[in-house]
Amino acid sequence: MRLSRSFGKTLREAPADAEMISHQLLIRGNFIRPAGAGIYTFMPFGYRVIRKIWNILSEEMDAIGGQEMWMPNLHPSALWEATGRWNTVDVLFKLKTGANREYALSATHEEIVVDLALRETESYRDLPRMVYHISKKFRNEARARGGLMRLREFIMKDAYTLDTSEEALDEYYPHMIQAYYNIFERCGTPARAINADVGAMGGKSSHEFVVPHDQGEDTFIACANCDYAANVEAAVFVREGEKPEKLDELVKTATPDCKTIADVADFIGVPTSQTGKAVFYWWTPAGEEEKNGRFIFGLVRGDLDVNEVKLINAIGEGTIRPATDAEIIAAGGTPGYASPIGLDVAKSIDAPGVFVIADTSLEAGGNFVVGANDDGYHYTGANYPRDFAISQMADIAQADTGHQCAQCGGRIEARRAIEAGHCFKLGTRYSKAVNATYLDENGKPKLIFMGSYGIGLDRLMATIVEKHHDEYGIIWPDSVAPFQVHLMHIGKGDDVRKTADSLYDTLRKEGFDVLYDDREASPGVKFNDADLIGVPWRITVGGRSLKQGGVEVKRRSEKDRHLVPVEELIAHLT
RNA sequence: CGGGGUGUGGCGCAGUUUGGUAGCGCGCGCCGUUCGGGACGGCGAGGUCAUCGGUUCAAGUCCGGUCACCCCGACCA
């Protein structure tokens, strides 16, 4: 590629609204251009990187028996209605055409795959299978952000497994995990697999691949001592603390103007871990309207916070939002001083009364200070189960830095990360919905076990830039670089130009991807563009080096420059 | 969806407070000089000031609506 003829130009300054480094450098380097919020064009350089990543993904998927295919992006509504997701996946872009034909733009492809599985799989002889494709996904994200980090239209590699049983799925799964490790390693963004929440994908369990990064959207927990790691939405930890030897008497105490846990603990003179924190939500079961939901009273030890995803998982499928003061009062609570003591506590989620869900931390401590359901008053010496009942005990508290690892007893810490990939054991979540079965050895129909495995190519490209850049620009790893060689001539002289021109031809004949800066620009401009674009090898043809008998060769990732005789150049690059 | 911010040549910005001929830097075109880390001089092209409406003799500037984009949060396959 001759730079003088390339479409688009590098920019000296990034648009002011680009905040992440990858966003700035990819725009400045002429890799991407915005078309709207969360919508980008991949310019020729950017598309080359995408193709490199694409090839790595294909190779790794093929290596574990994957079959690449290409699925549609326009999905008839019936397919999504069949799995029950037409109305529950709120980021779905929907289109209506004609009288009542409706479509969804592909947000993901479980619906297509399970429909295919239903049609193409007849007996156990047709299993297992692994198929994948790399294509566009459309999700109406409430808020696109960070350049390529969170998009409304993006490119995803998604693979799907079809197995005869949970055991068969479990057996294959590690191969996929290993392929993912290989992919991220090859792309220069080593990632680690952590336990994660399955979210709206449903299914049994999932692993997220995360690349630690301060501006990542994910928070995960990692043990400093052992290999335990999990998304904060799934992370378990030890509730340190003991029930007291002697239970204090329950005493109602005036606590004026103590609206927060810190206020109360300070006023009474106890650590926050000796208080109980009450939080209130309105829960709406999946597929129901909000009015059919119910009030949820959450209770955790005062030094901990509720993790809402864990809370939802403990209650059942559905959504929650913070309860209003009116709802708290209607449930018999006093906002700011609410208490489980004296409430008519529901026996279960279907039973009348107030549903109180308590974190297991309430059993790691006692003589708690809790609200008294009376404005300006708390109880001291509150103990479970002596003084109050609950509906359900569950793990609903958020793990955080300093907590104790459940696996080894060491200390865990919370870190930010970019979610680079996600593997789901879906089980029969989708096959059951459409009755996708196969006949087993005995001729009996059985449900197909599915898995789905995704990697966003655009996000991965941005992540690579986040991890591989310096103050001057991108430093592409060889594996995904848009070109292998950035050739340029600088200074005056016919011999300089001629040498560069012939090198361009020679290198291409030898099979190299070459970006040739053949512009009549000043050296500074050319060097700066080379640093910005970030091609791994830079070859400079100049009068000075020619006089010394060669051309200058430099790795983008290294400081040193080498004078290499023209005839030895190919050998030097390989 | 809640909070905050910004919309002025391709990019970065000033001008809005106090209404009165739309400016600067970069980039772009032509000519000349220059040529190993974003060179210099000269000439030049390019803007219904996001949009719609209102106030006014007069609106980039004041008032109202709308839209777009960015950041924080909520949500997130």
Image: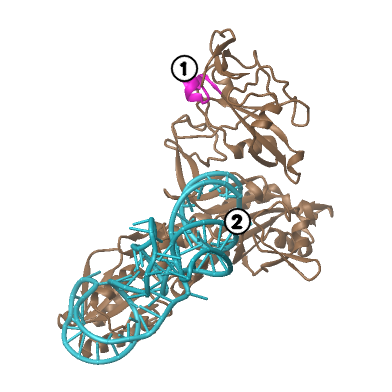
Chain colours: A brown, B cyan
Q: CA distance from mark 2 to mark 1?
A: 52 Å
Looking at the rendering, in which quadrant would you find the N terminus of chain A? bottom left
Looking at the rendering, in which quadrant would you find the C terminus of chain A? bottom left
Foreground pick, A533 / A538: A533
How dense is the environment of label 1, judged by Cα within 10 Å: few (below 14), some, or many (20 and up)? some
* Amino acid type at image mark 2: Tyr
Residue A386: % across, % down: 65, 13
Q: Is residue A216 above or below residue A499?
A: above
Quadrant of residue A269 in the image? top left
Disc sitting over residue A453 in the figure = 2
Q: Which residue is mark 1?
A: A267
Q: Secondary structure at mark 2?
A: strand
Foreground pick, A383 / B33: B33
* Amino acid type at image mark 1: Phe
**Span shown in magenta:** A258-276
User: Do the residues indicated by labels 2 and 1 lie within the same chain of the protein?
Assistant: yes
Looking at marks 2 and 1 on the same chain, the residue that comes earlier in the sequence is marked by 1
Foreground pick, A393 / A321: A321
Residue A128: % across, % down: 69, 58
Q: Is residue A465 visible?
A: no
- Along the horizontal axis of the image, is A357 left or right of A505? right
Q: Secondary structure at mark 1?
A: helix
